[in-house]
Amino acid sequence: MPELPEVEALAAYLRERAVGHTVQRFEVSSFSALKTYDPPASAVAGLELTSAGRHGKFLDIGLGPDLHLVVHLARAGWLHYRDGFKSPAPLKPGSGPIAIRVRLDDESGFDLTEAGTQKSLAAYLVRDPAEVPGVSRLGPDALAVSRDEFAARIKSRNGQVKGVIVDQEVLAGIGNAYSDEILHAAKMSPFALTGKLTDEQITTLYEAMREVEQDAVARSVGQKAAELKGEKRAGLRVHARTGLPCPVCGDTVREVSFADKSLQYCATCQTGGKPLADRRLSKLIR
C-alpha cells in the first residue's frame, strides 16, 4: 500500500509535471471507484490542475478554483503518468486495471489504476477535502506532530504499539510497511503495550518515526512515479524481508502472519532474541 512517503512523492511529481495544465477529459472506467456524484465527473473538463498535496495517505489534486480530486490508492492502487496516450478514444467501462484517466492539454496525463480483484481504490470529487469521511477522521500528520502531541496520541489508545501507530485516527500517514521499519529503528517489539511505554521509549519511538519517514520522503521525492515502488523496497530493512539477514545485527528477519497481512521484525534488535508467537490469538511474547 502506498504510504506517506510515496503519496508525498506522487504529489511532488504532479506539482512539477501537471500543475498549471488544463484537464481536457476526465474519464471514469470503474464507476465503483468514484464514490461521489455531486459535482459530476463532467465538471472536471476544462479546469486547471491547480495543486497537488496529501492528507495522510490520501492524494489531494486541486482542480479549478474550488474542486478537489481526493484519492486513496488502497492496497493495490497506483498513479501512472503518461507523456502521451496510445489512443484518443475514450476509455470503455471496465478497461482492465484503469479506474480513472485524466487527460491534460499537452496530451500528457495520468491513470489511476488498481491491480487484482479486490477493488478498494476510492476517488472523491469534492469541494472540500474534509467532505471525504477518511480525511475528516485523520489524526495529525506523522511528519507534522510534535513530540508532546505524539506522546498524547500514543497514550490515548491502550493497545499493541504496532496497531496504534497505524491507526489513521491516531496518526496520519503510517502504514504496515513503515510501521515495521519504525519499530525496528526504535528497537521495540510490535506487541509492546502503549500503556506501559516509558517517556524515554516514547521519545525513542518518536525520533525513529521522524527518521524513517523523513528518510523515505527524501529518497522518494524526485523519483518518477514508475520508480517509486522499487525505491521503497530498496530502502526497507525488515518489512517484506522475511528470512533475510537483518542489516543491523545479521539475525534472520522473522514474520508474524495474520489473516490478511503480516509484519516483519528482528528478534535480536526488538524482542531480546525471543521470537514472537506466529498466531493471532496466542499469548504473544513481549
Image: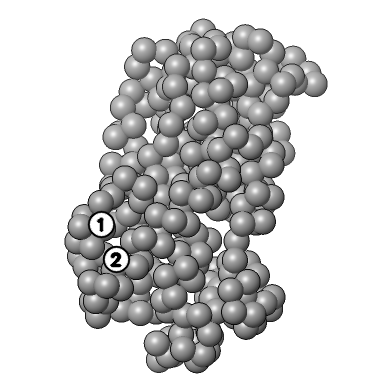
Q: Is residue 102 above or below residue 214?
A: above
| Residue indicated by mark 1 | 147
Residue 151 left/right relative to 230? left
* Residue kind at label 1, given as amino acid type: Arg
Residue 121 appears anywhere in the view? no
Between 100 and 130, the residue placed more toward the observer is 130
The residue under the point 66% across, 35% down is 224
Q: Which mark is residue 6?
A: none
Where disc 2 sits, the SS reads: helix
Q: Is residue 11 above or below residue 108?
A: below
Between 135 and 221, the residue placed more toward the observer is 221
Q: Is residue 176 above or below residue 220?
A: below
Residue 99 left/right relative to 67? right
Check contact, mark 2 vs mark 1: CB within 8 A: yes
Label 2: how many residues lie within 10 Å, few (<14), some (14-19) or many (20+)?
some
Task: Determine which quarter of the picture holds residue 235.
Answer: bottom right
| Residue indicated by mark 2 | 203
Name the N-terminal-most of marks 2 and 1: 1
* Residue kind at label 2, given as amino acid type: Thr
The residue under the point 53% across, 72% down is 263
Task: Determine which quarter of the picture holds residue 226.
Answer: top right
Residue 200 appears anywhere in the view? yes
How far across and how far down the image is residue 50, in percent? 45, 16
C-alpha gap between disc 2 and disc 1: 7 Å
How far across and how far down the image is residue 230, in percent? 69, 50
